[in-house]
Amino acid sequence: MKLTILGCSGSMPGPDSPSSGYLLESGGTRIALDLGNGTLGAMQRFVDPFTLDAVLFSHLHPDHCADFAALAVLRRYHPNPPYDPAVRRLPVFAPENAPRRLAALYAPNEAELARTDLSDVFEFIPISAEPMRIGAFEVQAIPVAHLCPAWGFRVAAEDKVLAYTGDTGCCPQLTELAADADVLLSEASWTDFAGAPDGVHLSGRQAAEAAKTAGARRLLLTHVAPWSDRDAILAEAVATFDGPTELVTPGGSYDV
């Protein structure tokens, strides 16, 4: 299983990175986990977006889904697509309100919103706790604690497991999500501080504690806000988790 970092900036794009977006490839199957601001442009450096087999959205905050509108433009208006996007609709696994929310993101104005239906090129599939088979991937979605309905994804292929937190605060579900995972791709939005709000984000220390408790083998830190101290986040994670730990970088590639 190959992981490519399309973007890893938390809450908004940073000067050196798009927002959150990740490409997973295995056995000829390609899926995207989130498509935040700027990630579709980055994706085109690695693969043709028409070769995606599915997109999975952990939640619908703009820094995780804003480039869906650009993907809709591509699939509707590319003059020479490799196939008819209306016949081969792209599966989109997302929270159940995604068709309405993403239509609002795409619609040119409020008057057009009621008539905006993107199901001509996308197949919307509400996320649930039921395992999902997407080509070479077996995906288990697990609800996590955030400011809106949010999911982490446990993705298995080639006898390997990658766990992706999406956005979350500390919650018991992280142990289930990352249990014995080969890689935990965890948000770490800020350094640890007293009075941090519950159910919003993880610090570097909290991400490391989640990896340690769950028995994950490797920790990759992502979703660092542009105003956060990356070195300090990494240092507190390394001090807590004994396994390999690093901050991901845009364009970085990892074998899981």
Image (cartoon, grey):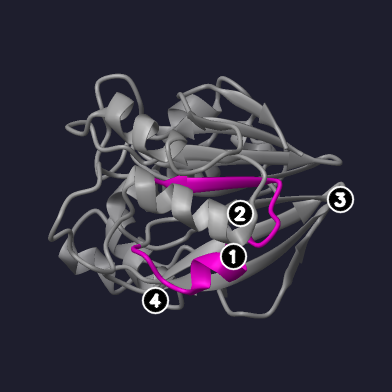
Mark 4: which amino acid?
Asn
Indicate which disc, 1 or 3, sits on the residue closer to the N terminus. 3
Check if mark 1's residue and mark 2's residue have beta carbons within 8 Å. Answer: yes
> Disc 3 to disc 4, how far (Cα)?
33 Å
- Residue 10 in the image: state x and y as whole percent: 30, 41
- Identify residue for label 4: 97
Secondary structure under tag 2 reads strand
Q: Residues within 10 Å of mark 4 (few under 14, many from 20)?
A: few
Q: Nearer the viewer, mark 4 or mark 1?
A: 1
Secondary structure under tag 3 reads loop
Q: Which residues are magenta?
A: 169-187
- Residue 219 in the image: state x and y as whole percent: 55, 41
Residue 71 belongs to the span the image colors magenta: no
Front one among 173 and 2: 173
- Identify residue for label 3: 159
Secondary structure under tag 1 reads helix
Q: Quadrant of the N terminus?
A: top right
- Residue 82 in the image: state x and y as whole percent: 71, 35
Indicate which disc, 3 or 4, sits on the residue closer to the N terminus. 4
Secondary structure under tag 4 reads loop
In this rendering, position of residue 186 left or right of residue 155: left
Check if mark 3's residue and mark 2's residue have beta carbons within 8 Å. Answer: no
Mark 2: which amino acid?
Ala
- Identify residue for label 1: 177
Name the residue rendered at 40%, 63% in the picture. Answer: 59
**Is residue 253 in view from this perspective?**
yes
Front one among 196 and 43: 196
> Disc 4 to disc 2, how far (Cα)?
24 Å
